Amino acid sequence: MLRFVNREDVDADIRRHESERLVPEPSPPMPAFVPDYHDDEIGMEDYYLDTYYPLLQHEHNRFRGLFEMAEVPVKPRPPLPCHGNMLIAESNKSQFSHRIHRLQPATPQEMRLNSRKRHVVGASAQFGVNTVHPTIQAKQNQMYLITSLLPSQGDQPALINRVLPKELLLRIFSYLDIVTLCKCAQVCRVWNRLAMDGSNWQQVDLFDFQKDIKASVVESLALRCGGFLKELSLKGCENVQDSAMRSFAAKCPNIEALVLSKCKYITDATSDYLGRYCHKISYLDLENCTAITDRSLKALSEGCHRLTELNISWCINVSDDGIRHVLENCPNLETLICKGCRGLSPNCFDDLKDKMNSIKTLNLLSCVFLNDVTVEAIAQSCPLLEYLCLSNCSDITDRSLQALSHGCPLLKDLELASCVNLTDVGFIGLSKNCHELERMDLEDCVQITDTAIVNLNSGCPNLNSLALSHCDHLTDNGLAELCQSHKDIMKVLELDNCSQLTDAALDLMKPMQNLERVDLYDCQHITKDAIRKFKQVRPDVDVHAYFAPASPPAQAQPQRRVSI
């Protein structure tokens, strides 16, 4: 059905609608382009507020945890448009410091209220950019709205837990010691999780808490650290027993260095657990674990093939068989310390010529049953030997020194204290081939004279530390040769109880440029005045001496009154 309308009514409706329309129609959430509104500034403001406010709210939630970045560009550059709620702050007119600030988006009503005081079109003029395209103009106006209309919270303090990422906090915590970590764990839940993270407990030394460490502590530590733990020292923790070590070995298979020194309740069972679970151990210290026997060394040698350092000092129940197990099954062993192992016989190293090629450090202090046969076997089997201690092995003679001269030319450190049977002949032979010697301890080698010192001067040019205490036959003449030949290299001289040394010895030491320490305890013919003059010339040298105090004068006894 057709209906006729009045043309005047239609024209009136059109004029009424055109007069009432002030703003553009609603746009989609993310328009592909921004229409050109020309000079309708109020309409443009409303358009951006309605269109981009949800986007600003979303970007604010996304970048809520960002922190300030203090990097300053080398060359000044104008700020570029930035997404979301990141603000590029202007530091001055010529240089910009780019920082990221956390912003709280305002409501559309607040933004409209503030925008009435500003002109969107003026944003382009402020940043000095010419309008060449409606889309570029829209982006510039969006940046202006973000930087000028939204309130900043830069003045509010930021918690470190929110500012720094977890990875950076963990890195910081990794530099803290045990005590500090335990204190930090009590600050808050976040710090507790960070402090107790296994990555912070790769190296644990409980020596300072030895009296308080019980089996439960070791078990809790193993549970907490797990595969992260690589180095653990339980030195002196006497309450640790095999049960705790069993749990530890099962939960910490990546342990590489373990110190159980003076854990007197540790037995062969612990070694069984270590050999079964901890195949990566390279350093093991069982010093003063007196319950350890050959069974322990067998278990360790079968399960811990990576051992490079082993300390079984004062394990009196270890015999030749235990040593053989270790040397035959641990081809990478470089350091073997057997101080005070009185169960070793003179033949403990026999028939091991091809099993000790990697040994560089060997300590046999106070292994009283060793003799020249033992030293000859060592010299034949250890071509790479650099450190050897035979102190208190009183049965060795010059024959041992001759063997070392031929078999161990790389020796750098030799300790022969209290080897009373050594004479000048042995040291003459030693100096012929052992030219790498840097340190020697000849304390209580009472038979050596100036002749031995003269030969060491010529044959050992790298000697920088020499102990000659209680060498009663040493005189100023022998010391003069030493001071002259080693004046540029000698650092330490121990001359305690050398009864024939006089004040002239100190005069001989004055030209020694690198001398650091001199021990002169109980040198009867060296006076205080000589030491004082030496210190005036060489104040940088530590002189250790002792002089008995003078006897105090006798006090006059008061006369007693006698009444008659």
Image (cartoon, grey):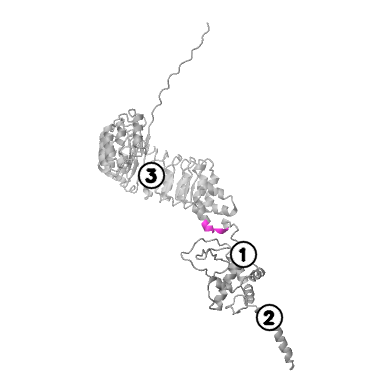
Local packing at callout 2 (Cα closer than 10 Å; few below 14, some 14-19, many 20+) is few
Separation of marks 1 and 2 at Cα, in angstroms = 32 Å
Q: Nearer the viewer, residue 500 or 283?
A: 500
In the picture, measured across the screen, residue 6 lies left or right of residue 452, that is right
Separation of marks 2 and 3 at Cα, in angstroms = 96 Å
Residue 466: x percent and y percent?
Answer: 32, 38
Residue 137: x percent and y percent?
Answer: 56, 75
Kindly indicate the quadrant of the structure image that contains residue 516.
top left
**What is the span of residues highlighted in magenta in the rendered image?**
162-168
Q: Main secondary structure of the magenta part?
A: helix
Tell which residue pokes out farthest to the top in this image: 564
Local packing at callout 1 (Cα closer than 10 Å; few below 14, some 14-19, many 20+) is some
In the picture, measured across the screen, residue 495 lies left or right of residue 163, that is left
Q: Amino acid at mark 2?
A: Arg
Q: Nearer the viewer, residue 94 or 459?
A: 94
> Where 139 sits versus 391, above or below?
below
Residue 510: x percent and y percent?
Answer: 31, 37
Looking at the rendered image, the quarter that the N terminus falls into is: bottom right
Residue 182: x percent and y percent?
Answer: 55, 48
Q: Which mark is residue 336?
A: 3
Q: Amino acid at mark 3?
A: Leu
Q: Secondary structure at mark 3?
A: strand
Residue position marked by numbered label 1 in the rendering: 151
